[in-house]
Every structure is written in structure tokens, then in C-alpha cells.
Amino acid sequence: SYEVTQPPSVSVSPGQTASITCSGENLGHKYVCWYQQKPGQSPVLVIYADAKRPSGIPERFSGSNSGNTATLTISGAQAMDEADYFCQAWVRNTVVFGGGTRLTVL
Amino acid sequence: QITLKESGPTLVKPTQTLTLTCTFSGFSLTSSGVAVGWIRQPPGKALEWLALIYSDDDKRYSPSLNSRLTITKDSSKNQVVLTMTDMDPVDTATYFCAHCVVYTDSLRNYFGSWGQGTLVTVSS
């Protein structure tokens, strides 16, 4: 079965750029979404179709996808961005989630 | 504004069947370009997709759980129901339903709105 892999954790200093990766075979040939989940809350979509931002999502969130890796980039990370981030792709009409990455802003 | 809310038992015994209901508003499951999905999350763990039902009643299931899952919809009540048979303690999780925006190529589909989730514990 198809799998996508994320690093368990990423740390970033406030104001710096955080990059969270999602890897899978030929992932660049699929569309990737990213969800942010804060403790005790439901996931929130922050990126869809590799690089599109839903309304209300700050411009500091951006996405890219090429080759075997999709990347969520948070430019000028803020304390409020500390959360778990999950990538998601569609594979043969089924949904695959990554294992999640905990972003720490410190 | 799209809202979804999950309801069902908070505690089930091993081998029992779980039935969860997602009641939604702000969209119609009779319109094209719409689907509702179920996703679960064991405590402290990752999201796991379970099932999806499209407005045309097409259904998709997680390959690993396919034999245990059934998803149905009642568009007149704005509800989607998920049943999972033969529950086990490893199925203890928060279960979410989510509104899915559907594209014709399906590859760009995304879950744009989520319910608050409901914690289901499996224990004797």
C-alpha cells in the first residue's frame, strides 16, 4: 500500500522559516493537502492542491510538491503556528495521511 | 457556513458494532462536487482515513478496514452514518467526519471542514 512519510518533529525559532516534508513514491504526480491540528482541536486545512491556500489562512503558509517530496513552508513562524501538521494525498480513490509532524516554535 | 457534528456512543464493548452519525449543515449531499468522509485519530497518534461517500452514493473505504466498514447517507436528514463491526480496543480513537470538496479528477479533493470529533473508547 502507498505510504507517505513525515519527520516526527521540526523546530524553528520565532520569525524564522519552517519546512515540513512529506515523502512518497512519485508524490509529485499527486496533489497534496496539509492540515494543522492544535491540541484538543480538529484539523484545519492550510494548503490544498499542493500550493493553494484556503481563505483565512495566512500568507506565511505555502506549499510545493515535486519529485518524491511535498513541502509545507511557514515563513516567519509564529508561536501560534506550534501544532501538529499532517500531509494527505489521494491514491487510487483512497485517502492517505502522513504520520504527522510536531512543529515546535521556540 | 458549513458545520458538522458527530454523535454516537462514547463506550463500546469488544466485538460490538459501532454506529456513528454525522449531522451537517451548510451544504447538501445531493449536489455534485461534495462528499463526506470519516477519519479517526487514536490518542496521541496520526489521522487515519476510514471512508467516504459521494453525492452520487459512490462509496470508498480504507483498504485495511474495508471488511468492517459501511457508510451510508440520508440526504433528506443531512446525515451520514458510519458503522464499524467487530470493535477492538485498538479502535479506541476520536472519530471525525469532514466535508470533502470534490473535483472531477478526484485528485485535488480536500477536507475543507471538520466536525469536533467524538471519542469512542472500546473496553469491556
Image (spheres, rainbow, N blue to C red):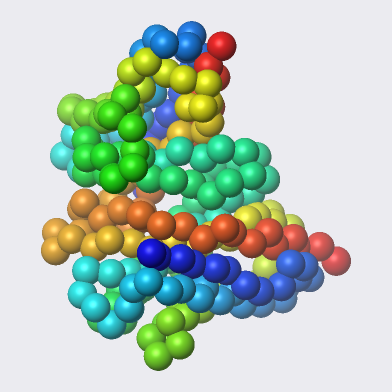
Residue B82: tell me if it is visible.
no
Q: Residue at x 18, y 60 (%)?
A: B103
Residue A72: tell me if it is visible.
yes
Question: Going by the image, does A28 lie left or right of A101?
Answer: left
**Which quarter shows the C terminus of chain A?**
top right
Examine the image and state in which quarter residue B101 appears: bottom left
The residue lying toward the viewer, choosing from B123 and A79, is: A79
Residue lying farthest to the right in this orientation: B124
Q: Residue at x 34, y 73 (%)?
A: B27
Q: Residue at x 51, y 40 (%)?
A: A37
Check the image and report above or below for A86 versus A62. Answer: below
- Residue A50, percent across and down? 23, 38
Q: Residue at x 46, y 57 (%)?
A: B114
- Residue A102, percent across and down? 53, 27
Check the image and report above or below for B5 versus A72. Answer: below
- Residue B124, percent across and down? 85, 66
Question: Going by the image, does B89 lie left or right of B23?
Answer: right
The residue lying toward the viewer, choosing from A28 and B109, is: B109
Question: Going by the image, does A92 lie left or right of B94?
Answer: left
Check the image and report above or below for A87 versus B82. Answer: above
The residue lying toward the viewer, choosing from B68 and B115, is: B115
Question: Going by the image, does A33 lie left or right of B32?
Answer: right
Q: How many marks?
A: 0
